[in-house]
Image: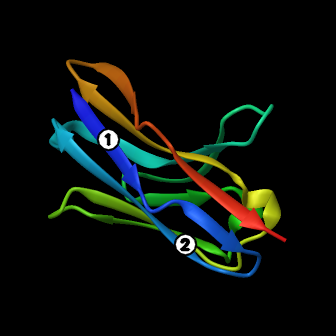
Amino acid sequence: QVHLVESGGGLVQAGGSLRLSCAASGSTFSITTIGWYRQAPGKQRDLVAAISSGVINYVDSVKGRFTISRDNVQNTMYLQMNSLKPEDTAVYFCYARTLRGGLFYDYWGQGTQVTVSS
């Protein structure tokens, strides 16, 4: 089991910055992939950025503006978001996938709201 808790969301003006944090606890040693998803009202939940086996991927719309990072000592993941745009407004979810006994398990945080005003 992995427990994820996000923090750092809020209201910011366009062009501003926010840093999201995701604290992981439990069987963190079994995590193979960790990342951030977001879900805007009326839309599906989409991948924003992820770290999988040391490889980092970003959705095209955030490349050059967002940076994902991971502190393995603190078991915390971050998403630094710069040059925010109104279209970045969404609930942001922390995600982790673990591998145990040959099976993958997915875990989600409760989400944190990010609102970017124009």
Q: Seen in the image, is 34 located left or right of residue 115?
A: left
Find residue 40 and report its horizontal and vertical position in percent. 73, 42
Can you tell which quarter of the image residue 11 is in?
bottom right
* Relative vertical location of residue 107 with respect to residue 46 in this rendering, above or below: above
In this orientation, does residue 60 appear?
no
Label 1 packing within 10 angstroms: few (<14), some (14-19), many (20+): many
Tag 1: residue type? Leu
Q: How many marks?
A: 2
Q: Residue at x 28, y 29 (%)?
A: 99
Can you tell which quarter of the image residue 104 is in?
top left
Find residue 102 and report its horizontal and vertical position in percent. 27, 19
Q: CA distance from mark 2 to mark 1?
A: 19 Å
Q: Residue at x 52, y 59 (%)?
A: 9
Helix, strand or loop under label 1: strand
Q: Nearer the viewer, residue 25 or 102?
A: 25
Q: Identify the residue under disc 1.
A: 4
Q: Seen in the image, is 31 located left or right of residue 95?
A: left
Q: Are marks 2 and 1 in contact (CB under 8 Å)?
A: no
Helix, strand or loop under label 2: strand
- Colouring of the image: rainbow
Tag 2: residue type? Leu
Q: Seen in the image, is 28 located left or right of residue 109?
A: left
Numbered circle sitting on residue 97: none
Q: Seen in the image, is 49 located left or right of residue 74?
A: right
Q: Identify the residue under disc 2.
A: 18
Q: Residue at x 70, y 65 (%)?
A: 62
In this orientation, does residue 30 appear?
yes
Q: Earlier in the sequence, mark 2 or mark 1?
A: 1
Looking at the rendered image, the quarter that the C terminus falls into is: bottom right
